[in-house]
Amino acid sequence: MRQSRLLLNTLREAPADAEVISHRLMLRAGYIRQLAAGIYTYLPLGRRVLRKAEQIVREEMDRAGALEMLMPVLQPAELWKESGRYSVYGPELMRLNDRHDREFALGPTHEEVITSVVKGEINSYRKLPVTLYQIQTKFRDERRPRFGLLRGREFLMKDAYSFDTDWEGLDESYRKMYQAYNRILTRCEINFRAVEADAGAIGGEGGTHEFMALADIGEDTIAACTLCEYAANLEQAESKAVRMESTERSPEEKPVKFHTPDIRTISQLVQFLGVRPSDIMKTIVYAADKTAVAVVVRGDREVNEIKVQNFLRAQDLSIADAAAVEKAVGAPVGFAGPFGLNIPVLLDEEVLGMANGIAGANEADYHYRNLNPSRDLTNYEIGDFRQAAEGDGCPRCAEGVLKLSRGIEVGHVFKLGTKYSDKLGASFLDAAGKSGSIIMGCYGIGVSRILSAVIEQNHDANGIIWPFALAPYQVHLIPVSVKDDAQMRMANDMYRHLQEKGIEVLMDDRDERPGVKFKDSDLIGIPLRVVIGKDAVQGRVEFAERKSGLKEIITVEAACERIFKRARLAKPAD
């Protein structure tokens, strides 16, 4: 491609509302333009990169035995109501009515549609297993679209769905998709971790993993072991329970109620009593589907609300307001405790091991000391209800500790089980003629989100640094002066030769100053650059690598051979 004919306008500065580096660089480098909040046009360079990402995903899906199809964006609302997700998905589901006042939704995902399709096409075990996928635009009415392609209202996604006759088959389908995702992200040169995760609105009956691109601007926090392979989203992360030695009195002493005038918070108690936060039982009252529940963790811990909600199988969970707290425990906020409560109590496993704990007395301006849960509490349920923290012990290995980092979710794989097939009636007849529900898996990867994740990990002060597999062009050919006959003769000959060998070349044939050309080249991030200048008459060029910063004056033949070698190395192994 000759750059003089390419629709490419670079910007000196990015718009002020571009918050993260990937958004700023894609705008400045002329890859995307915003049409409305969370809605973007892909300009020619952006579309080329997007197609490269699509192709990598497609190749690995095909390699894993999945079959490509295409489903409608427009989905009848009845399907969503039948699955029970119409209300669960909430305002993110974009809804509309046609001229006959029939209600539809713009698909944010396709579990309902694919289950309906398979219900009509498969009725025998002989047609299973099968995995189907599509690459398609999705729509979600984000409350606050931001970060460019990372959180948009319209985005490109690959979603795949596996269908099996039993759980062993699902395990195998899941394994294949898990491995395919590892290959996809490796080929895109993304630094990632596969982490255990919560299923969220997709739901399911089995395991789920998120594939996280490590980046400081990531909206998710990852807890990963320093020694073993354990990694989980913080919403799901477990940690080794630790018993803290008490600084209080002998464990034989009975609970004592004492006066704590207007002492409501953990920090106030610590200062008032001269104790550690870990000596205190923090009791928080929640409304779980409008039912009051008390959750108790150590004072140096935070409640993990996702774990609590999943344990209770609640549709909705929120911290109770002041009036609800007083009604539930008989005391204002700040004085709740687990001793003597008449509402359900969820006790974190670390609390059960406390001796001589301090907790609210369920009476204004009073607390208890010397509380031993295993002795003094009767009606409670034990579980892991705390949020994992930096430095906690790994739940999987003996010596490792957890380290927290930020990540961008680029993929998610689920074991759905029969969640959708039961509700939508997708069944099959086995060899004995007995009917059973098809067992499903779901596998999504954000194709457009990959672009932003790659840039967040691959950039410098001058611009983008594309991996070879995703770059819009593989080589940027830059004659310093288009008015120099020797330079242009060499540039045109090299341009034709590389194209004939299947190399994707962008030649900057614009009549611009060299500084402008080099700045634009760095900004758009093509991995290899060949500069044709005053040494052209000696048959020599400057060969440069965008990532390493390497620059060498070599012969044009040597430059071509290096380009061909790099292209060969970029081809995926069979």
Image: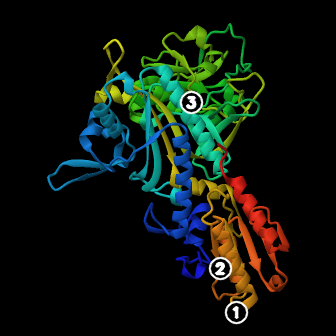
CB under 8 Å between discs 1 and 3: no
Q: Amino acid at mark 2?
A: Asp
Give the residue number, with chain letter if any, for mark 2. 508
Which sits earlier in the primary sequence, circle 3 or circle 2? 3
- Secondary structure of the residue carrying tag 2 is loop
Front residue of 217/194: it is 194
Label 3: state its secondary structure: helix
For residue 81, side relative to residue 42 (left or right): left
Upstream in the sequence, badge 1 or badge 3?
A: 3
> With 528 as the anchor, is 299 left or right in this view?
left
Which of 221/498 is in front? Answer: 498
Lower position in the chain sequence, tag 2 or tag 1 = 1
Q: Secondary structure at mark 1?
A: loop
* 27 lies above or below 78: below
Residue 313 found in image quarter:
top left
Q: Amino acid at mark 1?
A: Lys
